[in-house]
Image: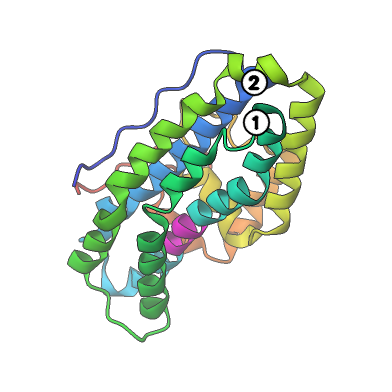
Amino acid sequence: MPAPYPLLDMPPGDFSNMFDYQAINMAAAHNAFIQGINAMVAHASTVPPEKVQPFMIFSLAVVDNIHHHHDLEEQYLFPELEKKLGQGALSGNVEEHKEFVPQLLELKEYLEKVKAGEAKYDATLFVEKIHSFSDIMIAHLNHEIPSLESSRMRAVFTEKELKDIDSGFMNLALKKIEFATTMPLSVVCGNPATPWFPPFPLPLKWATRWWFARKYSEAWEFGPLDLYGNPREMPKA
């Protein structure tokens, strides 16, 4: 299993331009997922017994964040975009979800059992379960970006329409997350090359560092960044 997976190259354009934003923002989100998967693999064999529970919280946050993102794509984002792009224009992305989501959920079930004390943590099994879907998922994360390419957006949408879709996506996302896990994870699995992601207001970023991160503070030690966005040295996978 490759470790670490390389991060996606950022698409060309300006993050503040709503036509460019679609692909750029998606690539930044995908890089956060890759950061999380890389960190899980890197730490898998070095987690001491007293840190297994925080590691399960971190790993569940990564898995839940990926699954939550794909649910929102299928339920809201892609249908909204297809109103102008044409029905089925993004169906290839959804079909690819089916190739790895079942295995992702199997990993989640295992993590929950370890967290509940119903299964013993096994680093080899843990990495095998990641390997069962990660290559396919990483390929998908790369494939999805061109489907949101700037010229494709510009051809059929107005800037206001895209802003409204993005606002709707963010509102739904914030309604369905657990702030004590998703918000800190968004920081510690960030990419120093894109410090503007996630595009949360500054007060929310402050609240993440000083409040939301406190409940599971030990879990965020497994992130590739600290809560200030500084890179950490990762164990050799």
Question: Nearest the camera: 87 or 102?
Answer: 87
Provide the secondary structure element on which disc 2 rests: helix
Q: Give the camera-side residue of 40 and 23.
A: 23
Disc number at residue 86? 1
Report if residue 7 lies within the magenta region. no
Picture quadrant where residue 162 is located = top right
Q: Position of residue 177 (x, y in %)?
A: 64, 58
Viewer-nearest of discs 1 and 2: 1
- For residue 153, the mark is 2
Task: State whether the magenta stretch is mostly helix, strand or loop.
Answer: helix
| Amino acid type shown at disc 1 | Gly
Q: What is the x, y in percent for residue 68?
A: 56, 55
- When the figure is inspected, residue 73 is found, relative to residue 112, above or below; the finding is above
Considering every residue shown, the one lying at the far bottom of the view is 118
Q: Element type at marker 1?
A: loop
Disc 2 crowd rating (10 Å Cα; few below 14, some 14-19, many 20+) is many
Query: Mark 1 Cα within 10 Å, few/some/many (few <14, many 20+)?
Result: few
Q: Residue at x 31, y 82 (%)?
A: 119
Residue found at x 42% / y 57%: 101
Please give the range of residues in magenta. Answer: 58-64
Q: Are marks 1 and 2 in contact (CB under 8 Å)?
A: no
Q: Is residue 226 visible?
A: no
Vertical relation: 1 (above or below) 176 = above
Indicate the position of residue 160 as horizontal and vertical percent values: 81, 24
Residue sitting at x 68%, y 47%: 76
Query: Would residue 43 appear left or right of 236 to someone viewing this image?
Result: right
Asked if residue 59 is among those painted magenta in the image, a careful observer would answer yes
- Residue 20 location (% of width, % of height): 61, 18
Specify the amino acid type for callout 2: Met
Left or right of 76, for residue 213: left
Asked if residue 158 shows in the view, the reply is: yes
